[in-house]
Image (spheres, rainbow, N blue to C red):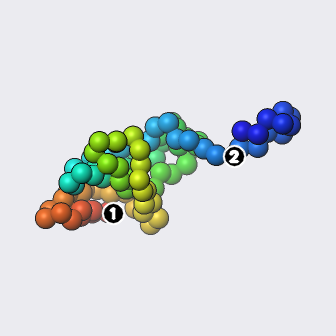
Amino acid sequence: MAASDRDHPQVRSVTPLAWPVDQVFVMGDYLVELTSGQNRNWYWSYGASQPVNPVLRVARSAEPDRILAAYVLSNSLPVLGATVKEGKLYLAQA
């Protein structure tokens, strides 16, 4: 935060301390974390009533807390099932 004007601070960046993860898949040296979007009331999601879209996050197995990429599934349909077969991730949404 910029604290030069204490009455009107400005947020310069946001650092997530935690995020919901429903399933984790190990794919070689990488982890694929899946947030299914089924639970719509995560207490850390910027307001309890805000919907949580399904999210895929990719991290190295050696550094699971350092997210390399995140992909939000913007259709907002929850993920009902997920599996890995022959190196490919398959998702079922409804």
User: In terms of depth relative to the viewer, which is nearer, 51 or 27?
Assistant: 27
Depicted 16 relative to depicted 56: above or below: above
Depicted 7 relative to depicted 25: above or below: above
Disc 1: which residue: 94
Residue 69: x percent and y percent?
Answer: 42, 56
Residue 58: x percent and y percent?
Answer: 35, 53
- Horizontal arrangement in the rendering, residue 91 relative to residue 49 (left or right): left
Q: Residue at x 47, y 64 (%)?
A: 74
Task: Name the outermost residue toward the top.
Answer: 6
Residue 63: x percent and y percent?
Answer: 34, 42
Where the N terminus falls, by quadrant? top right
Residue 9: x percent and y percent?
Answer: 79, 39
Q: Quick one: label 2, few (<14), some, or many (20+) residues within 10 Å?
A: few
The label shown at residue 55 is none
Q: Quick one: label 1, few (<14), some, or many (20+) residues within 10 Å?
A: few
Q: Residue at x 13, y 64 (%)?
A: 86
Distance Cα–Cα, label 2 vs label 1: 37 Å
- Horizontal arrangement in the rendering, residue 54 relative to residue 26 (left or right): right
Amino acid at the residue labelled 1: Ala
Of labels 2 and 1, earlier in sequence is 2
Q: Residue at x 41, y 53 (%)?
A: 68
> Secondary structure under badge 2?
loop
User: In terms of depth relative to the viewer, which is nearer, 73 or 5?
Assistant: 5
> Secondary structure under badge 1?
loop
State the count of labels.
2
Disc 2: which residue: 12
